[in-house]
Amino acid sequence: AHDLHEVKEAQAALAAREEELRFFAENIPEAICYVDLERGCTFVNNLFLATRGFNREMALGKFPEDVYAPDVYEEVKPHIERAILGVESSFDRVMRMPSGEERWVRVRISPRRDAAGVVRGYYAVSTDIHEIRAAQAEIEDKERQLRQVIDSVPTPMCYVDAELRYRYVNNAFLDYIGLKPDEIVGRPVVDVLGEERFRQLHPHLERLKTGESLAVERLVRFADGRARWMIVRLTPRI
Protein backbone atom coordinates (compact mmCIF):
# COMPACT_ATOMS: atom_id res chain seq x y z
CA ALA A 1 0.00 0.00 0.00
CA HIS A 2 1.13 3.52 -0.70
CA ASP A 3 0.29 6.47 1.52
CA LEU A 4 -1.56 9.00 -0.69
CA HIS A 5 -2.86 11.16 2.11
CA GLU A 6 -0.57 14.14 1.45
CA VAL A 7 -1.15 13.91 -2.30
CA LYS A 8 -4.91 13.92 -1.80
CA GLU A 9 -4.68 16.86 0.58
CA ALA A 10 -2.60 18.79 -1.94
CA GLN A 11 -5.08 17.99 -4.71
CA ALA A 12 -7.99 19.13 -2.55
CA ALA A 13 -6.20 22.35 -1.64
CA LEU A 14 -5.44 22.98 -5.32
CA ALA A 15 -9.06 22.36 -6.30
CA ALA A 16 -10.27 24.72 -3.58
CA ARG A 17 -7.84 27.38 -4.73
CA GLU A 18 -8.96 26.99 -8.34
CA GLU A 19 -12.58 27.34 -7.24
CA GLU A 20 -11.73 30.55 -5.35
CA LEU A 21 -9.98 31.99 -8.39
CA ARG A 22 -12.87 31.02 -10.67
CA PHE A 23 -15.37 32.63 -8.29
CA PHE A 24 -13.27 35.81 -8.29
CA ALA A 25 -12.98 35.83 -12.10
CA GLU A 26 -16.74 35.35 -12.50
CA ASN A 27 -17.60 38.26 -10.22
CA ILE A 28 -15.42 41.08 -11.45
CA PRO A 29 -16.71 43.59 -14.05
CA GLU A 30 -14.13 42.62 -16.67
CA ALA A 31 -14.40 40.06 -19.44
CA ILE A 32 -11.49 37.60 -19.15
CA CYS A 33 -10.08 34.81 -21.23
CA TYR A 34 -6.82 32.88 -21.26
CA VAL A 35 -5.35 31.42 -24.43
CA ASP A 36 -2.66 28.76 -24.22
CA LEU A 37 -0.34 28.85 -27.23
CA GLU A 38 -0.65 25.09 -27.72
CA ARG A 39 -4.15 24.23 -26.43
CA GLY A 40 -6.09 27.34 -27.36
CA CYS A 41 -8.53 28.97 -24.97
CA THR A 42 -8.56 27.20 -21.59
CA PHE A 43 -10.55 29.70 -19.53
CA VAL A 44 -13.29 32.27 -20.11
CA ASN A 45 -15.56 33.93 -17.59
CA ASN A 46 -19.29 34.36 -18.06
CA LEU A 47 -19.03 38.06 -18.90
CA PHE A 48 -16.64 37.30 -21.75
CA LEU A 49 -19.08 34.77 -23.19
CA ALA A 50 -22.11 37.02 -22.76
CA THR A 51 -20.54 40.06 -24.42
CA ARG A 52 -19.24 38.03 -27.38
CA GLY A 53 -22.29 35.88 -27.90
CA PHE A 54 -20.25 32.69 -27.33
CA ASN A 55 -20.88 29.59 -25.27
CA ARG A 56 -18.12 27.54 -23.66
CA GLU A 57 -18.17 24.92 -26.40
CA MET A 58 -17.52 27.65 -28.98
CA ALA A 59 -14.63 29.14 -27.01
CA LEU A 60 -12.75 26.45 -25.10
CA GLY A 61 -9.98 24.76 -27.03
CA LYS A 62 -10.21 27.36 -29.81
CA PHE A 63 -7.85 30.09 -30.97
CA PRO A 64 -9.05 33.65 -31.74
CA GLU A 65 -8.88 33.12 -35.50
CA ASP A 66 -11.26 30.15 -35.07
CA VAL A 67 -14.07 32.10 -33.41
CA TYR A 68 -13.80 35.76 -34.39
CA ALA A 69 -15.00 37.29 -37.64
CA PRO A 70 -12.07 38.04 -39.99
CA ASP A 71 -12.30 41.82 -39.55
CA VAL A 72 -12.31 41.51 -35.74
CA TYR A 73 -9.38 39.10 -35.77
CA GLU A 74 -7.34 41.38 -38.06
CA GLU A 75 -7.93 44.23 -35.59
CA VAL A 76 -6.66 42.31 -32.55
CA LYS A 77 -4.02 40.20 -34.33
CA PRO A 78 -1.12 42.72 -33.96
CA HIS A 79 -1.70 42.88 -30.20
CA ILE A 80 -1.82 39.10 -29.89
CA GLU A 81 1.44 38.84 -31.81
CA ARG A 82 3.03 41.30 -29.40
CA ALA A 83 1.85 39.22 -26.44
CA ILE A 84 3.37 36.09 -27.97
CA LEU A 85 6.66 38.00 -28.16
CA GLY A 86 6.30 38.84 -24.47
CA VAL A 87 5.03 42.42 -24.76
CA GLU A 88 1.86 43.59 -23.02
CA SER A 89 -0.42 45.90 -24.98
CA SER A 90 -3.57 47.89 -24.33
CA PHE A 91 -5.96 49.37 -26.87
CA ASP A 92 -9.49 50.74 -27.20
CA ARG A 93 -11.94 49.39 -29.72
CA VAL A 94 -15.64 49.47 -30.57
CA MET A 95 -17.20 46.07 -29.93
CA ARG A 96 -20.53 44.97 -31.35
CA MET A 97 -22.60 43.20 -28.71
CA PRO A 98 -24.88 40.23 -29.48
CA SER A 99 -27.81 42.68 -29.27
CA GLY A 100 -26.30 44.75 -32.08
CA GLU A 101 -25.33 47.60 -29.74
CA GLU A 102 -21.82 48.99 -30.20
CA ARG A 103 -19.80 49.84 -27.11
CA TRP A 104 -16.27 51.06 -26.45
CA VAL A 105 -14.06 48.62 -24.57
CA ARG A 106 -10.45 48.76 -23.42
CA VAL A 107 -8.57 45.53 -24.04
CA ARG A 108 -5.38 44.57 -22.26
CA ILE A 109 -3.45 41.55 -23.54
CA SER A 110 -0.75 40.27 -21.19
CA PRO A 111 1.69 37.43 -21.83
CA ARG A 112 1.96 34.54 -19.34
CA ARG A 113 5.44 33.12 -18.82
CA ASP A 114 6.54 29.87 -17.19
CA ALA A 115 9.24 29.59 -14.55
CA ALA A 116 11.92 29.73 -17.26
CA GLY A 117 10.51 32.98 -18.67
CA VAL A 118 9.10 31.36 -21.82
CA VAL A 119 5.74 32.73 -23.01
CA ARG A 120 3.14 29.96 -22.76
CA GLY A 121 -0.01 31.94 -23.43
CA TYR A 122 -1.72 35.23 -22.83
CA TYR A 123 -4.59 36.78 -20.90
CA ALA A 124 -7.09 39.10 -22.58
CA VAL A 125 -9.01 41.39 -20.21
CA SER A 126 -11.71 43.72 -21.56
CA THR A 127 -13.19 46.64 -19.62
CA ASP A 128 -16.30 48.50 -20.72
CA ILE A 129 -15.39 52.20 -21.05
CA HIS A 130 -18.38 53.27 -23.13
CA GLU A 131 -19.69 55.80 -20.59
CA ILE A 132 -16.20 57.28 -20.23
CA ARG A 133 -15.78 57.67 -23.99
CA ALA A 134 -19.29 59.13 -24.30
CA ALA A 135 -18.50 61.68 -21.57
CA GLN A 136 -15.21 62.55 -23.29
CA ALA A 137 -17.02 63.04 -26.60
CA GLU A 138 -19.56 65.31 -24.90
CA ILE A 139 -16.79 67.39 -23.32
CA GLU A 140 -14.97 67.65 -26.65
CA ASP A 141 -18.19 68.73 -28.36
CA LYS A 142 -18.78 71.43 -25.75
CA GLU A 143 -15.16 72.58 -26.12
CA ARG A 144 -15.64 72.86 -29.88
CA GLN A 145 -18.79 74.90 -29.36
CA LEU A 146 -16.99 77.15 -26.87
CA ARG A 147 -14.08 77.62 -29.27
CA GLN A 148 -16.51 78.61 -32.02
CA VAL A 149 -18.03 81.23 -29.73
CA ILE A 150 -14.63 82.55 -28.61
CA ASP A 151 -13.32 82.62 -32.18
CA SER A 152 -16.32 84.70 -33.23
CA VAL A 153 -15.48 87.37 -30.63
CA PRO A 154 -13.71 90.28 -32.42
CA THR A 155 -11.54 91.03 -29.38
CA PRO A 156 -8.14 89.30 -29.04
CA MET A 157 -8.33 86.61 -26.35
CA CYS A 158 -5.84 84.09 -25.05
CA TYR A 159 -5.28 81.65 -22.19
CA VAL A 160 -1.84 81.45 -20.57
CA ASP A 161 -0.90 78.74 -18.06
CA ALA A 162 1.03 79.08 -14.78
CA GLU A 163 4.32 78.63 -16.64
CA LEU A 164 3.48 81.61 -18.84
CA ARG A 165 2.95 79.54 -21.96
CA TYR A 166 0.09 80.11 -24.39
CA ARG A 167 -2.51 77.32 -24.30
CA TYR A 168 -5.27 78.85 -26.39
CA VAL A 169 -5.69 81.90 -28.62
CA ASN A 170 -8.69 83.01 -30.67
CA ASN A 171 -8.71 84.22 -34.28
CA ALA A 172 -8.68 87.88 -33.26
CA PHE A 173 -5.50 87.27 -31.25
CA LEU A 174 -3.88 85.67 -34.30
CA ASP A 175 -4.71 88.80 -36.33
CA TYR A 176 -3.25 90.96 -33.56
CA ILE A 177 0.00 89.06 -33.24
CA GLY A 178 0.38 88.11 -36.91
CA LEU A 179 1.31 84.48 -36.29
CA LYS A 180 -0.21 81.04 -36.87
CA PRO A 181 -1.61 78.94 -33.96
CA ASP A 182 1.31 76.48 -34.03
CA GLU A 183 3.70 79.42 -33.74
CA ILE A 184 2.01 80.51 -30.50
CA VAL A 185 0.37 77.64 -28.61
CA GLY A 186 2.82 75.97 -26.24
CA ARG A 187 5.41 78.74 -26.52
CA PRO A 188 6.43 81.14 -23.71
CA VAL A 189 4.75 84.54 -23.70
CA VAL A 190 8.10 86.32 -23.79
CA ASP A 191 9.07 84.49 -27.00
CA VAL A 192 5.86 85.47 -28.75
CA LEU A 193 5.53 89.06 -27.55
CA GLY A 194 9.22 89.91 -27.51
CA GLU A 195 11.28 91.31 -24.65
CA GLU A 196 9.93 94.89 -24.76
CA ARG A 197 6.21 94.05 -24.74
CA PHE A 198 6.75 91.33 -22.15
CA ARG A 199 8.60 93.78 -19.88
CA GLN A 200 5.57 96.10 -20.00
CA LEU A 201 3.22 93.22 -19.23
CA HIS A 202 5.29 91.55 -16.51
CA PRO A 203 4.22 93.73 -13.52
CA HIS A 204 0.58 92.96 -14.28
CA LEU A 205 1.33 89.25 -14.48
CA GLU A 206 2.92 89.40 -11.04
CA ARG A 207 -0.27 90.93 -9.64
CA LEU A 208 -2.29 88.13 -11.22
CA LYS A 209 -0.36 85.61 -9.11
CA THR A 210 -2.00 87.10 -6.01
CA GLY A 211 -5.45 86.36 -7.44
CA GLU A 212 -6.17 89.94 -8.50
CA SER A 213 -8.14 90.67 -11.68
CA LEU A 214 -6.95 93.67 -13.70
CA ALA A 215 -8.27 96.01 -16.40
CA VAL A 216 -5.50 98.03 -18.04
CA GLU A 217 -5.81 100.70 -20.71
CA ARG A 218 -3.01 100.55 -23.22
CA LEU A 219 -2.19 101.33 -26.82
CA VAL A 220 -2.19 98.00 -28.64
CA ARG A 221 -0.15 97.76 -31.82
CA PHE A 222 -1.34 95.14 -34.30
CA ALA A 223 0.88 93.15 -36.63
CA ASP A 224 -0.50 95.03 -39.65
CA GLY A 225 0.68 98.36 -38.20
CA ARG A 226 -2.60 99.54 -36.70
CA ALA A 227 -2.56 101.00 -33.20
CA ARG A 228 -5.71 101.15 -31.06
CA TRP A 229 -6.39 102.07 -27.45
CA MET A 230 -7.97 99.08 -25.76
CA ILE A 231 -8.90 97.87 -22.29
CA VAL A 232 -6.89 94.73 -21.61
CA ARG A 233 -8.55 92.49 -19.02
CA LEU A 234 -6.41 89.99 -17.15
CA THR A 235 -8.21 87.40 -15.04
CA PRO A 236 -6.46 84.69 -13.01
CA ARG A 237 -7.70 81.12 -13.16
CA ILE A 238 -7.88 79.90 -9.59
Image (cartoon, grey):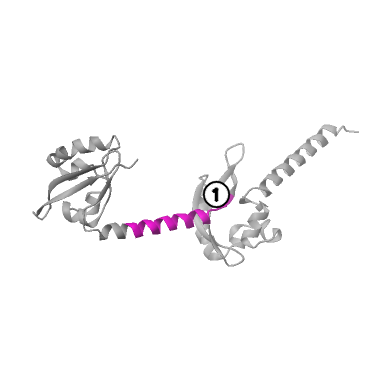
- Residue 112 image-quadrant placement: top right
Q: Is residue 217 left or right of residue 29?
A: left
Task: Name the spot of residue 129 as percent of width and height, x first.
Answer: 53, 53
Image coordinates for residue 38, horizontal then vertical, percent: 64, 51
**Residue 24 inside the magenta-drawn segment:** no
Please state which of residues 103 and 165 is positioned toward the viewer in this rendering: 165
SS for callout 1: strand
Instruction: Kindly give the residue lying farthest to the right in the view shown.
Output: 1
Horizontal placement of 114 versus 205: left or right?
Answer: right
Which SS type dominates the magenta stretch? Answer: helix
Q: Which residues are magenta?
A: 124-146
At a point 69% along the width and 43% down the height, the residue shown is: 21
Q: Position of residue 73 (x, y in %)?
A: 54, 61
Is residue 59 in view from this perspective? yes
Residue 139 is covered by the magenta coloring: yes
Q: Tell me if residue 67 comes above or below residue 110 in the rendering.
A: below
Task: Look at the picture and state if 71 lies above or below 108.
Answer: below
**Which residue sits at x=26%, y=42%?**
165
Amino acid carrying label 1: it is: Ile
| Number of other residues with Cα within 10 Å of mark 1, as a class: few under 14, some 14 to 19, many 20 or more | many
Quadrant location of the C terminus? top left
Q: Residue at x 58, y 50 (%)?
A: 125
The residue at the far bottom in this view is 100
Specify the quadrant that holds the N terminus.
top right
Which is nearer the eye, 174 or 101?
174
Q: Mark 1 — residue?
A: 109
